[in-house]
Image (cartoon, helix red, strand yellow):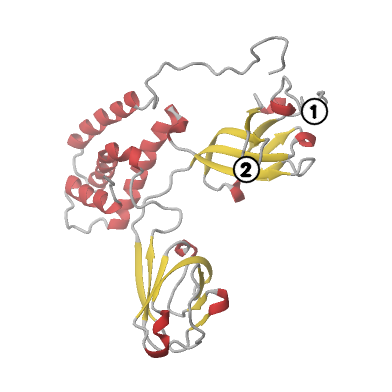
Amino acid sequence: MAVTVEDLIAQTRRESGLKNNQFYTDTDIITFLTEGYHDLRDMLVIRFAHWFKRTYEFSLAGGESANSINMETLVPDFQMAQGLDLNLGSSVTPDWKTVDQLASFAERNQMNGIWPSMASVWSFNGFIGRKFWIDGDTLEVLPAGNAQGNYRLVYTPIGEPLAEEVTRTFDIETDDSIVESLSQWNLQNAAFTADDVGMSLTIAGMTGDNTDLNGTYTITVVNSATQCETLEAPSHNGVNPLDGTATVHGQPAGTIGELPEKLTPWARYLVLYASMVIRNGRGQSTAGQETEFNRMQARVIALTKQRSETTGQAPVTRGYRRAYYG
């Protein structure tokens, strides 16, 4: 069963003794819960990075200045790499091969003169003589002359902050307008932000010739505080809606409204963490919470080192027979 942000706030208020007291607002409590969530998540990732996984596919042309991608721009939620794959097949029938990582930054230029750097066979220094390295916000495939190809980065993402769903309703004014061909809405009271992308825009209360505008649309682009574009085109050629209201509803972009399912057994960890912050801030004792929190922290460390019960084995990275390259 999902544990929502609203559930966590209510539990924290009871645990910390706030109840209906607004000494700390719900926004404050969400901040403390997010800190607890990140603390719990970091403990898991440190012991086993593969608890969380995302992928990003990209292509490189190869050669100097065409053997890298900007991670800050293209993969802004990147925390650590789990691996890089090279696709020797197609997008329909992929054939993924592992690209090794450089052992250290000092090794970055050692492959520049290695033969056969442009060969289409296995070689002793990685698949088709290439390796990857992440330096700051840049992921490079080396040597540059052999970097051409289609890749898949497997990585551990940064934990998103917790947030409640947003709902705001505003009036549509007589000089608001729509551009049907662009699925574009111009609504002066909207106060759109980039966080609205992916949320729903519900139009209600339109009458007469504007009735066909009533419905729910998905925001895909925010151009300004008063203008957005939607996935669904409004089926109307009018430019002056005269009545009605609009409601923006959804989860703010880059946030989560409930705990990931794999972390629901540890929801109380967040509640205890936030409750201790609150009680400390009010000069109250946290002895009861600390005892339970320390026990739970020890359990997390003991039970989440691996997600597998089988015996671990060191990876096989060399060839099986000396006669073959591997």
Decide which of 100, 212 is in the foreground and name it.
Answer: 212
**Residue 215 shown left or right of residue 126 in the figure:** left
Which residue matches tag 1? 119
Measure the C-alpha gap from mark 2 to mark 1.
Answer: 29 Å
**Residue 39, image x and y in percent?**
37, 38
The N terminus lies in which quarter of the figure?
top left
**Residue 58, image x and y in percent?**
64, 45
The answer to whether the residue labelled 2 contacts the one labelled 1, judged by CB atoms less than 8 Å apart, is: no
The C terminus lies in which quarter of the figure?
top right
**Residue 180, image x and y in percent?**
53, 79
Disc 2: CA contacts within 10 A as few (<14), some (14-19) or many (>=20)? some
Secondary structure beneath label 1:
loop
Which residue matches tag 2? 137
Disc 1: CA contacts within 10 A as few (<14), some (14-19) or many (>=20)? few
**Residue 216, image x and y in percent?**
40, 71
Nearer the observer: mark 2 or 1; the answer is 1
Eyeballing the image, is 81 above or below 73? above
Q: Kindly identify the residue that appears in the image at 34 percent across and 38 percent down.
A: 262
Secondary structure beneath label 2:
loop
Amino acid bearing label 1: Ala
> In the drawing, what numbered circle is on residue 85?
none
Eyeballing the image, is 29 above or below 104? below
Query: Closer to the N terminus: mark 2 or mark 1?
Result: 1
Decide which of 273, 300 is in the foreground and name it.
Answer: 300
The answer to which quarter of the image holds residue 81 is top right
Eyeballing the image, is 195 above or below 257? below
**Residue 307 shown left or right of residue 82 in the figure:** left
Residue at the far front: name it. 93
Amino acid bearing label 2: Asp
